[in-house]
Image: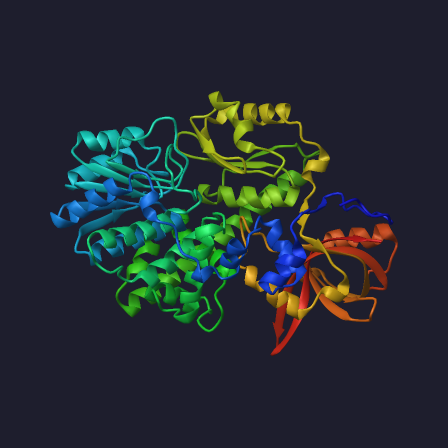
Amino acid sequence: MNAPSGNGANTAHWHLRQTDADLPLMARTLGITETTARVMANRGIRTKNTALAFLHPVLAPLRDMHEMKDIEAALERIARALATDEKIVIYGDYDVDGIMSTVILYRALTRLGGDVSYYVPHRTEEGYGLNMEAVEYLHADAAQLLITVDNGISAVEEIARAAELGIDTVIIDHHEAGDNLPPAIAIVDPKQPDCPYPFKDLCAAALVYKFCAALCEKINIPYIEEREMCTLAAIACICDIVSLADENRTLVCRGLAVLNTDKLINPGLGALITQRGYIDKTIDAYTIGFVLGPCLNATGRLESAEISIDLLLADDIDSRVMLAKDLIDLNDARKNLTKECVDRALVELEQLPELPKILVLTDAEAHESVAGIVAGRLRDHTGRPTILLTPGEAAWKGSGRSIPAYNLFEAMSAHRHLYHRFGGHAAAAGLTLPEENIPRLREALNHDCTLTEADFAPSHDIDAELDAAEITLELSRELERLAPFGKGNAAPLFVTRNLRVESVRNLHEKNTLIFTFKSRDNKRVKGIAFGLNAQYDRAVADAGVDGAGGFTLHAAYRIETNVYNGNVSVQMAVRDFVVL
């Protein structure tokens, strides 16, 4: 999209997606508007079958788990352990995906009569994944079969040690495999080499959910509590930010449908929903990702993830209520720690004469578990890739978050000699390094960096350009059929040019703008923008217009259905604008 003319106008970072799909044919065939057809085409949905599956995801079939490499060996080994009463230990992880993976597998194996327990490492004391001390402990505790969930694919030495001690291991993981695979009895991971399973982006809990279905099928027992397990897998898909496409979309839609039909499908989860005030409200992907999920995650950050597992497995009401309140209290504490750390960093940044292109910050007071969250907040605030480091016992630990124009993993990989430990991907990374290497890392990354100021500006992929008259409640409700939105299925973003602003309420104390827009045919549409007040104040001042209204702008926005006091209307959720 070219930047339009006008005082201070700059839409260079608004990119209108192009498609050669036959939109009128799609619209007629599917019974939708051409606008919705364009949004679907922009997401690669081009055939009738894929479109119908996308519009009716609850009915879409899941793929055959038997296509997964090593699945038969894994099923055989676990079935044998169940038949011979071997002691089984599930080794999980402390985030929501690891928690749900552990709960799903534990519930399935216990219902099948297994002698099963679980072990989740402590984030700060043990770190991610299987460790040697845990292997020795499990051996001393007479474990015979170890099943790792949401981890294990990189634990080559640890699983080799387990084998030496007579412990067989089955891995169920979804992370990238390294050059060397662990010597496990079976590895169920679609990302490992030579795995023919066509969809590679399942989260671990989704893999475990499907694995349990295959296990029940193998021993000829109905999948016990399948609807509940699907719901837990759906929550993990949302919280682990995997692509909401293909099977993930199906699982999430099925799980949300179950949860909204029966919010007590898992009584522990129901207690959390009740304590958060959502028992009589619709649960959607936003609720999971920003209301419930952070509470489940907070236990693994500040205490032990076993608190969340205990909640989801709790048998009595009093325990569930107590644990749910504990989760909420921990999340409130996590939010306070995050805010304090962000505030300290912003003060530090304001004192700099110029912002570096790559921010490498330290905070001796920060809790290491919030480093990644804080790095993401600072990245969003500055537009710059950010790494935040906190002190550990023997070294500094850190997390980094990046922007689309900067591959953080590649950039940091060039300086591996500076770290004790390092891992990640293009958008995020984690590391441990000695304190004396922090300034060296800061200098090296900024020396290598070729980003320009243009790369730091937020960019928006626009699905379609609409006339104001096309912004209707009917279109909003039709677009809701494309939800849930997230990674791999971004909420549709539209642009309307030369939109008349009739009035604006500038609520500085809430960092909120409330617009009344007016179309050429005198139709009024409400708009709302969060966090853009400073940008708005600068824009109206630069354009020399009255900020209370009476001017025009170009707007990038999402279309939403607003319900207020029983009244239902369409609303524009403004994400960016250019005042003319």
Camera-side residue: 190 or 362? 190
**Looking at the image, which residue is at 19% across and 53% down?**
219
Camera-side residue: 472 or 234? 472
* Res 91 quadrant in image: top left
Q: Is residue 110 above or below residue 72?
A: below
Q: Is residue 271 above or below residue 148?
A: below
Residue 45 appears left or right of 494: left
Residue pushed farthest bottom? 566
In this view of the protein, can residue 304 be seen by the observer? no
* Res 144 quadrant in image: top left
Q: Position of residue 158 (x, y in %)?
A: 27, 31
Q: Position of residue 89 (x, y in %)?
A: 22, 45
In this view of the protein, can residue 155 be seen by the observer? yes
Residue pushed farthest top? 417
Q: Position of residue 544 (x, y in %)?
A: 88, 54
**Looking at the image, which residue is at 62% across and 45% down?**
380
Residue 374 appears left or right of 538: left
Residue 42 appears left or right of 542: left
Q: Is residue 189 above or below residue 241?
A: above
Q: Position of residue 559 (x, y in %)?
A: 66, 62
**Looking at the image, which residue is at 39% across and 53% down?**
62
Residue pushed farthest left? 84
Camera-side residue: 142 or 552? 552
